[in-house]
Structures are given as C-alpha cells and as structure tokens.
Image: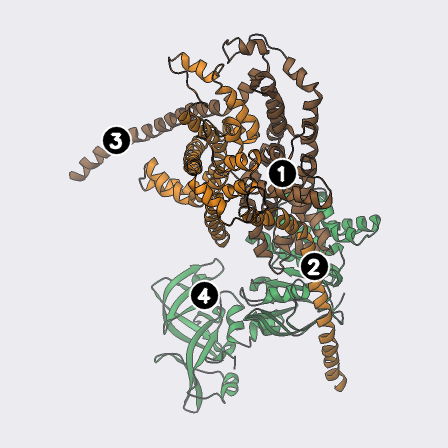
Amino acid sequence: MASTVMIDKAAPTRNPAYGSMSRDRAWALKWSYFFLTLFAIFSLVPPLYMLITSLKSSAEISAATNPWWVFHPTLSNYVGLLTSNQFLTFFRNSVLVSIFVVTITMLISVPAAFALSRMRFWGSATLATGVFLTYLIPDTLLFLPLFKMFAVFGDWTGIQLINRWYVLVVVYPTLTVPFCTWIMIGYFASIPKELDEAAIIDGASWLQTLTRIFIPVALPGIIAATIFAFTVSWAQFLYPLVFTTSTDQLVLPVGIITSLVKGDVFNWGQIMTGALLGAAPPLIIYAFLMDYYIAGLTAGATKG
Amino acid sequence: MVDVAFQPNSVLETRVVRKRASLRTALKRKSTAAFLMTLPLILLVTILVIYPAFYSLHLATLNKSMQRFVGFGNFEFLFKRETFWLVVKQSCIFAITAVVFKALIGFIVAHFVHNVPAKGQRKWRGMLLVPWVIPPAMSTLAWLWLFDPSYSAFNYTLSFFHVGPIAWTGDAYWARFSVILVNIWFGAPFFMILYLASLKSVPEQLYEAAAIDGANWWQRIWYVTLPMMRNIIAITLLFSLIVTFANFDIVRILTAGGPLDHTHIFATWAFRVGIEGGDIPLGASVSLFMFPILAIAAVFILRDINQRGNEA
Amino acid sequence: MADVTLRKVIKRYDEVEAVRGIDLDIADHEFVVLVGPSGCGKSTTLRMIAGLEDITDGDIMIGGDVVNDVPPKDRDIAMVFQNYALYPHMTVAENMSFGLRLKRYPKAEIKTRIDEAARMLDIVELVDRKPKQLSGGQRQRVAMGRAIVRNPKVFLFDEPLSNLDAKLRVQMRIEIKKVHQKVRTTTVYVTHDQVEAMTLADRVVVMNHGRIEQIGTPNDLYHNPATRFVAGFIGSPAMNFMPCRLEDVAGKLNIRLTDRIAFPLPPGRAARYQGVGRNEKLLLGLRPEHITEAKAHPEPGVEAFDAVLDVTEPMGMETLIYFTLEGAQICGRVNPNAGARAGGPLRLAVDLNNMHLLNEVTGVVI
C-alpha cells in the first residue's frame, strides 16, 4: 500500500518537473538575451558615439542638442582630416612602423619558435621560459631607461634615435616578439613529431622543413601572430609619446591627441573622426579575420 | 672463416673513429643552426629588455642630473612624499577593483553567450569583443568625450532622470570611478573570450552527470564549471593584474592623473616625474615599485604554466 | 634493393637501455616483422635503422655499407608512420612527390612514378585531394604511395595499421602483402599485433625487454617457440601453461599436473624429456586447440580427463571453454556440439603430441 501511494505521489510531480525545466531554459535564454543586449550596448556605445560625433559640425556639437543624434550630418570632419598633410603624415608613420614591426617580428619569432620547439639544444627550455617572462615585463617599466639609453646612444654614435619615427621600429619588437614566439612555439608543438620525421626522411633540411612544412601547416598561427603584432604596434601609445615629439615624426594615437587638442580647445568632431580612423584598421582586420584574432588571443592567454 | 671473423672487427675500428668525428660535427651543426635561429631573439631581449631593466635599477640610484650617486636617496625622498603614498594606494585600488570586475563580468557574460544557441554566439562574441580591438588610446578619447562636463552625453542622458550633472573626471572619486570603468570596459572582453573558450572545453557529459546526480545550476557551476576552469581563471587574473597594474594609456588620456593627483598610478606618475618633470632617476624609482607585484604574479603564472605543461 | 644488418646494436637513453644488443640479418627482398609488447624496443630499433635515433653502440648496415652516421635522407629508405604523417597542406600527389621534388627529379619522371604508385594502390582518382578529405584507409595508401615512389632500398613500417578499425586492418594487411609481392623491396615492419606479424612476415622477430627472444618463420614460431614469452605471445587465444612435474611410474614417464591428474607421455616425448630432473619445477604448455572434447577412439598420445567449465564462449565454428586447474585458468576449443555448458562438467582430451615442456624458472622450452 505504502509503495503505491509513493508512486502515485511521484508520478504527478514528474511531468510538471520536466515542463518547468524547459520553462526554466526558455527563461534563462530570455534573460541571456536581455543581458547580452545590455552588455553589447555598453561595449558599442563609445565606438558608436565616435561615429555620431564625427558626422557633426562644430556648430552642432556646441549647440548642446541631443548628443545621441545627428541632425545635420556632414563629412566635413573626414574631408578636413584626410586632406590635412599632418594627419596623413601620422597615418603614413603608423603604417610604416607597423609594416616594419610586423616583418621584423615574424622574421625573428618564427625561426626562434621553430628552433625552441623542435631543435632541442642546451638551454632551450630555459630560453622558452625566459621568452615568456620577458613578455610579462611591461612597457611602463622600461620607457625611462630606454629613453636614457637612446639618448646616450645618440651621444656616442651620433645616430639620433630620439624623435625619429624609426625608433619605434626598434622598440616595438620588444612588445611583439616574445608573445609571437610564445604562441608560435605552441602552434609548432601541436604539429605531430612524425611530420618532421617524414620530411627528414624525404630529404628535407631543417630550413626546408621550416619553410615547406611548418610554416604552411602552422599558417593559422602565423596569421594570428601577425594580427597580434600589427594590433600592438598600431595601438602602442606610451613609447611614441615618450620617444617622438615633432609633428612629422608622430604616429596616429599620439598625433591625434597632441595635435588636435589645441591648448584647452578640444575640437571634438575632428578628434572623434581621427580616433575612428585610427581605430579603423584593427577593426577592419578584426571584422574579416575574427577567428584568427580570437585564436591568437586564446593561444597565449594575452595581456588583459 | 678467418675472413668473416676479421671483417667485422675492421669495420668496427674505422667506425669508432668516423663516428666520433662526424657525430660531433653533426651535433655542432644542429645546435649551431638552432642557436643562430634564436640569436636575433636573444639579442633583442637582452639589449632592449633585460639590459634596460637593470639599467633602470642603476638610474634609480642617481640624482636628477644623473651625475651623482645617491644610493637610496630617491626612495627616501619618495617615502616622505604624500603623493607617493597616494599613488601606491590608487594603483592598488585601481588594479584590484578593475581586475575583479573584469573577471566577474567576463565570467557572467561568457555564460550568457554560452547559453544562447550556437548559431548566434559568433555574432554576440563579435560585438562584445569590439572594445578589446580598438586601440585603447582611441577608445579612451571617446570616453573622455562621453564624460565631457559641458556637452557630456552621459550627463545629458542622466538629466532626464534628474540626476547630476556629474563631474566624471573633475571630482576625485568620480574620476577614480571613471578610469576603472573604462578599464573594465576595455578588459572584460578578454576575460569573456577566454572563459568562453574554457567553458566550451568542459565536456557536456559532466553537466549531464551532475544533473542526474541532482545538482542545481548553482551546484553545477560550483562543482563542475569552476574546478574545470580553475587554471584559466588563475592565469587570466594574474595576467590582468600585471597589465592593469602597469596601465598607462587610459589614466593618461582620461585624467592625466588629476584632479590633484587623485587618479595617478605608478606608470602615469613615473611619466609625469620622469619625462614631464625631467627627473629620470626619480621616475625610474617610481616605476620600479611595479616590479615586486609583477615578480610575484610572474612566479605564480610560471607555476601554473608548468603545471599545465605537466598535465598535457 | 638491399639487405639490412644489425650488429650488437644498443640504444641507451640516459639510464634506460631501450635496446640491449640486437643482431639481425635481413636478406634482400625479405619481409621481416618486429613484434613485441609496447616498450620492447621494436620501434626504437626501426627508428635507428631509419636514422631518426642515434645508435649508442653497434653497427647498422644497409646494402653492405655502415650507415651509423649517415643522415636519414642519405640512407635511401622510406618510412610509413602510425599516424600516416601526411603533409596536411599538400595534395596526395604533392605528398607523394615531396621527396622527389626535393631531390630535383625531372617532372616527367615524377609524374610516371606517381601514376604507377597510384595505380598500384588504387588511389588514382584521389591524387588531387588533400589528406583531410581522405578516409583512414586511403591515407594509409597514400602514406605507402609516398614510400613506393621513392623506390628506396628499404621500406620501414612503424605500426602502420594501428589507427585503423579491425575490418580495414585486415584489408590493408592484404594490400601491404600484395604491394610487397609486386615491388619486392626489403621491408622491416613493426607491430604489437601478433596476428599482423604472423600473416605478413617472411620471418618474425619477437622482441622483449630490448632483446630478441626468437627469430623464425611464422610457422616455426607457432609450433616451436623457444621461450615461454614467445610461446605465450604468439597465438590467440594464448597458450595455456600448467605447473607440472615428471615422474616415473612402472618404468614409464608420466607428467603429473595435479594430485588427481597425471598423463603418460607418448613415446617420442618420453625419450626427449628423459634427461629432465624429476623434481624440477616445470610448465606444461598446451595450445587451446590441443585441449578438445574427448573422442570415443582417441589417437595415441591423446589423454582424457574431466573438468568443470567456468565459462563458455561460442564462436560459431567452435566454442572456447575455460576451466580452472590448480588456480590457473585454462582455455580449450571444443566442437559446438560437444555439449559444453558453463558450470557443467565435460570430458576433455589433451593432445600431448603437441605439448611443450618449459622450465618454470628460466622460461626456456625444453
């Protein structure tokens, strides 16, 4: 008797339990969408606000109308910046620095990662750890000694580095190479050992194994590392702020801030346009190569 | 018979000689090649990272004109200044608060993204990572404009709720809040992406097993998700602590340390003292205070990474 | 085409000796299989022949030349790996021709060789695909094709079928045998699967703990194992071992298994074991097919006894039976109609003409 009662009791509660579970799921999903929307708004407000402001004239900005809306859209800010030699110089400097830095970074880190992951030699494990530790040393710890070093270097050799855009080509690799080497070691390590053994038996030298097997196979990793190197050198702010001062030597981030702010006067329309144009290259790369971007991010547990 | 017995011996002898010589050259060749391939890396790191790191130790012991050795003079001077202690306090508040909120928000948002159907995840992830992609110097400008006291979009919006106007960057407390907010905005996506990847790597069967064992959603997070993500959580926290502690861009652009030094952190103050104030040794001394925190975090990270290597 | 010779080859990793002095002569055109449990040094031996591992001591000769210090690419060998090791970014044709292209063979020559190999392996329609688009068996064929186009002196196979499912493994086994019959290249093949070893090899080399236990033809190893290890490793289900001793009963030699069970030895065997000490601890080795149901008119040397079965496994054409004797589990093969039933008694017969007698301490077959 008792057991029948138990079963009777259990049976009716069971079906609603299933029902409530799927109802829970539906609610969870609704709440997820709600909060995701909130967070997406939070994430996208600053860039959207850049866009809104960049389409306004100075008059509209100072008129204190609804800041979230453009009443008289104009491209004058864009025209103004893109025809200004100064801005184009910043842009050119940024492009040059980034291209050089990315090239140097890949030339240094890919062979190094290959040697560290495949050609075990004395001290290679220590070196790999050392590379990782270097990556943890921030730019804010090094900018003062580097500034002094470059000044002394200039006095000794007569080669002026301070206030030249190419000084950035010298220092940026310290930010990009350790991380790129680190993630490339990871990518190379995931290539099965048999693949290079097969290549060796096929008669490939170490260099051929690297160029004809490893680089093509680890191409996703190389793309991720390239994107990382580009993003870092495009976004770096402290080094150019410290090492360059003349307007013809500045890169975008510093250029926009130092040249568009005239005294206490903020020309917000132009500043936002410049910021948006400065943010555009990484955003465009991100839009097209998001998966590589994220792969690089997760591969090394990047700075955050 | 004699021939047969003799031949292997002669082969053996010539082999020993040849083996020694060629083995050595072969070893030499391989490790030489490997060394040459890592040489640019070694040079770069030695000249532009390790040397300057030690050079800054040396710089910190000099006087302002860098001609006289003052020992710990710079540090003694710093310890006596109120601003220095303010900077220490603010750096700690800034780093800890920002990191905790970045991690929390990242963790929560990662769960929300994980919750929605797989098809839509890409889209959400794409939007939520945008803050991380924009160069911080550029996005901080947008924040500065959003915070603008007279034409501020935020204050305009808040006025509809009869709140404010708020001096976002003018008041010491609000300014601290603002720099932390921007830092969270910039850094949370990083946590979100890593936690999302980590969430996806937890086998679905574990949750099913836990559900069958009668665990509710909270118990599932506590007993399944968190233990599985422990490693990645530790690493991201330490990483972020290092980077946030050493942050420069956001504070520099948003407040430049003001008002009245109430948002300065080590990096911005070192810049103010060293570059703008022209006292490189004092600036170097300030930035050296970042080192202990970095070293401690690095030790823990290294331990975690080694553990990860051993597990694999 | 060449013979391969190993002389006192030793491989030491720091403290561990993986290969402890191997002597092996492989004739031209021969198909030799190295078989043994994991960690027995068979793969290390193969990799030393390939030149992927340095030799600590000893000599390896290919085609009469000592190749100890010759790098792999100059040894004129080809290797097939367990995980195929196909270059993922190259098509099948590019995979097969990579070695030839590195050696700057003329294009026409490369093409003929690829065509020939592709036809031999029945992968003609796959040559433009990438490895990702291939099934496991197809990848295995491509890996073999890559070896064949090189036309090397020696083929080396490192557990090439381990990643395939059981059915495909049987199929590829036959494929490998066919290829060898066509190209006749000297082949060294490593596997842990004794069935593969038996079916493929001209000669099988059984290895254990870095040493060679026995070398012989498959039939030789099966019927005349030299040691307990070989006897137990070759054959499935494995050979049964029962503790026993010899005793003289009325001028005849008996083998006593338990207090109750003892069998007279057939005359041929009795003569062979006459010199063995009567108190020595011995093992009787009997393959399952030599433990069957008792027949009405047994042949000479076949002795009957009763057993209670623990488990029966009907296989269709036969039934495997398991029973316990002095704590040891014994397996026999009986006719499906013999009435074998778990928990039930059955009268069984042992064929002592095919018995092996082993020294329990040394493990040597007497």
Q: Residue B32 shows which numbered tag?
A: 2
Q: Which residue is mark 1?
A: A229
Please determine if labels 1 and 2 lie on a single subunit.
no
Q: What secondary structure is marked by label 2?
A: helix
Tell me the amino acid under the disc marked 2: Thr
Q: Chain of mark 4?
A: C
Task: Tell us which disc is closer to us: 1 or 4.
Answer: 1
Tell me the amino acid under the disc marked 3: Thr
Chain identifier, orange in the render: B
Per the model, the C-alpha gap separating discs 1 and 2 is 28 Å
The reply to whether callout 1 and callout 3 are in contact (CB within 8 Å) is no
- Chain C colour? green
Residue C288, given in percent of the width and then of the height, sits at: 47, 69
- Chain A colour? brown
Q: Chain of mark 1?
A: A
Q: Of residues B58 and A80, which is closer to you in this image? A: B58
Residue A121, given in percent of the width and then of the height, sits at: 63, 59
Q: Earlier in the sequence, mark 1 or mark 3?
A: 3
Q: Which residue is mark 3?
A: A13
User: Looking at the picture, does residue C46 appear above or below residue B177?
Assistant: below
- Compared across the picture, whether B170 is left or right of A121 comes to left
